[in-house]
Image (cartoon, rainbow, N blue to C red):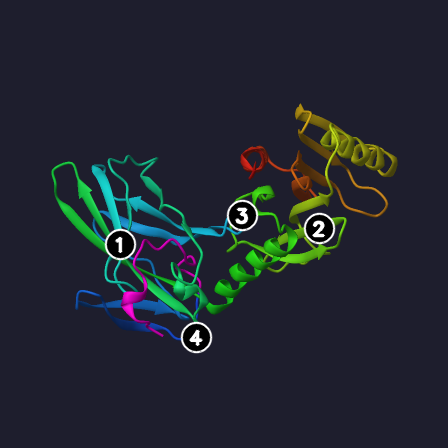
């Protein structure tokens, strides 16, 4: 369904990685752009294929989302075939009348790869009406490449937002709104909802929990797990450290092979790591976690890997994500 173009008046920062399919059809399809130009794109099983020209090829045109903040943005990755691309401008030219998405300014490649992110926008029926519409939504991005001599080349890349992915994002927002009613007390933590899906959520007067796993996994059968918890009630001084100490004591009683390390600590914020080789029939686990004291309770965010320890790259990446989590006051 192609909606009224006038509905969208600001930058789009939503979507699904373009490789995700929405229909079981393949072959070339014509698309009428906002300026009247007709372009033919190749599709496989409903998914648009990567676009390329003599200067670059598209690797990704996908969504980033922060459900806690109710914000979304676009991320783009290009592989360069030439060395002197200095600027990239991207606009959306199918769903809207050429709305700007990002302008990199002067840019340099990292090992011939350009990683770009648009500004974030709030999710609402006024700003992102397509997210609330039935069915899939297709966007087409016009990517203008400029080199140091002022020459330009253009790429067009479709990106499809499926009905399932749109609903998954809205459900995640609803879960979090149910979990934390006081918006100034939310713990903001960015999670790629194209990869991670809420599989377990529970709420009562004393505590709340949401667990995220990857496709094909469940709350019981997982290899990687992201956990977001809230222990409700006005916390006393040092509550974060005491909760971690209780957890550590319980873990050592259950698993003698446990190793535990506090990575950073203050009276309201504790960052720690633990792992064990397996016990009581449970496989080995390795976890990075942080406990933060807020206005309405104590928050906990954790990334856990099961069966094998994290490699150094995975550990560094998730440690930074957890460090970057912020309590909105």
The residue identified by callout 1 is 91
Can you identify the residue that label 2 sits on? 208
Mark 4 lies on a secondary structure that is loop
Q: Earlier in the sequence, mark 3 or mark 4?
A: 4
Q: Earlier in the sequence, mark 1 or mark 2?
A: 1
Which numbered mark, 1 or 2, is in the foreground of this view? 2
Q: Mark 2 or mark 3, which is nearer the start of the sequence?
A: 3
Nearer to us: label 2 or label 4: 2
Left or right of residue 22: residue 54: left
Task: Report the residue marked by disc 3.
Answer: 191
Residue range in magenta is: 1-20
Pick the front one: 324 or 24: 324
Between disc 4 and disc 1, the foreground one is 1
Q: Secondary structure at mark 2?
A: strand
Residue beneath label 4, please? 24
Q: Is 307 within the magenta?
A: no
Which is nearer the N-term, disc 2 or disc 4? 4
Disc 1 crowd rating (10 Å Cα; few below 14, some 14-19, many 20+) is many
Q: Looking at the image, which is closer to me, 113 or 101?
A: 101
The chief SS type of the magenta part is loop
Residue 159 placement, left or right of 275 = left
- How far apart are the two marked residues, 1 and 2, measured between alpha carbons? 40 Å
Question: How far across and how far down the image is residue 243, in percent?
Answer: 77, 34
The answer to whether the residues at label 1 and label 2 have Cβ atoms under 8 Å apart is no
């Amino acid at each position: 369904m192609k909606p009224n173009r006038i509905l969208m008046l600001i930058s789009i920062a939503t979507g699904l990685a373009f490789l995700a399919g929405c229909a079981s059809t393949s072959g070339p399809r014509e698309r009428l752009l906002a300026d009247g130009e007709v372009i033919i794109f190749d599709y496989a099983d409903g998914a648009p294929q990567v676009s390329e020209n003599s200067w670059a090829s598209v690797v990704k045109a996908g969504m980033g989302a922060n459900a806690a903040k109710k914000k979304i943005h676009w991320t783009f990755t290009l592989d360069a075939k030439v060395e002197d691309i200095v600027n990239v401008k991207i606009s959306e030219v199918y769903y809207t009348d050429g709305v700007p998405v990002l302008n990199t300014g002067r840019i340099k490649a990292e090992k011939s790869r350009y990683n770009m992110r648009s500004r974030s926008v709030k999710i609402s029926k006024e700003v992102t009406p397509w997210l609330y519409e039935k069915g899939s939504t297709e966007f087409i991005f016009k990517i203008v490449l400029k080199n140091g001599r002022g020459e330009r080349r253009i790429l067009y890349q479709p990106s499809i937002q499926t009905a399932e992915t749109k609903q998954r994002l809205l459900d995640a927002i609803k879960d979090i709104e149910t979990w934390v009613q006081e918006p100034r007390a939310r713990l903001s933590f960015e999670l790629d909802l194209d990869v991670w899906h809420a599989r377990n959520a529970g709420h009562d007067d004393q505590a709340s929990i949401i667990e995220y796993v990857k496709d094909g996994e469940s709350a019981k059968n997982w290899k990687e797990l992201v956990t977001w918890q809230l222990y409700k009630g006005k916390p006393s001084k040092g509550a974060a450290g005491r909760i971690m100490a209780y957890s550590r004591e319980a873990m050592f009683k259950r698993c003698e092979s446990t190793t535990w390390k506090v990575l950073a600590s203050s009276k309201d914020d504790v960052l720690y790591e633990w792992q064990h080789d397996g016990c009581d029939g449970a496989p080995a686990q390795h976890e990075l976690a942080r406990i933060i004291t807020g206005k309405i309770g104590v928050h906990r965010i954790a990334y856990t890997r099961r069966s094998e320890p994290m490699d150094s790259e995975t550990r560094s990446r998730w440690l930074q994500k957890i460090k970057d989590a912020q309590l909105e006051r």
